[in-house]
Amino acid sequence: MNSFSWAIAVPIELVLAGMSWQEHLKVRLLAVIFNTLIARPFSLYRNWVMGRFGGRGTLHAYLVDTFVFLSFQLPLYLGNMYLGGASWAEMATASATFMLIAGALGRPYGIYLDWLRRVWKDNPAMAEPRALA
């Protein structure tokens, strides 16, 4: 999520919402912490929703991934912006934009997650912890 969200957040927060660089950096640094902490719960949630409602074609996968992305990420994004010092107007603008583009992001993020899983699962050397010495 960290690698995916930063590129998406720059135009939303700086250009559309009008946040300052200081606010943006604070929000993004908090996002690194939050995204790292919620990565596994998000994955479990996505797997659960996909298990119940997925597997019925491309359009259905698109709708389910979009729902999962929006329902899990939007509340976290709002909280992150609040803690980062964004104003209510900035939060409203950024959230509305986030909701509008979630349809464009949900499925690509799902595909990105599936690709990362294949890379890590199919390459045991990457999955094994290594000693520093």
Image: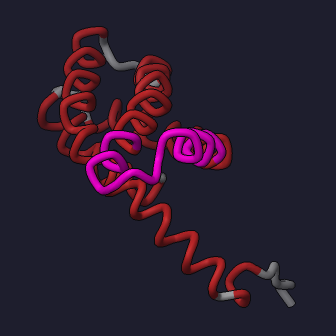
Instruction: Please state which of residues 78 and 122 is positioned toward the viewer in this rendering.
Output: 122
Name the residue at 26% across, 28% down.
99
61 part of magenta stretch = yes
Total marks shown come to: 0
Instruction: Please state which of residues 20 and 63 is positioned toward the viewer in this rendering.
Output: 63
Q: Is residue 65 left or right of residue 45?
A: left
Name the residue at 58% across, 46% down.
51
Farthest residue in the top direction?
A: 88
Name the residue at 24% across, 34% down.
13
Residue 90 % position (x, y): 24, 18
76 above or below 55? above
Residue 125 % position (x, y): 72, 90
Farthest residue in the front direction?
A: 56
Q: Quadrant of the C terminus?
A: bottom right
Q: Is residue 130 left or right of residue 79?
A: right
Name the residue at 55% across, 80% down.
119
**What residue span does the magenta drawing correspond to?**
44-64
- Where is residue 19, by image quadrant? top left
Magenta-highlighted stretch: main secondary structure?
helix
Instruction: Please state which of residues 117 and 29 is positioned toward the viewer in this rendering.
Output: 117
Residue 60 % position (x, y): 33, 45
Residue 12 % position (x, y): 21, 37
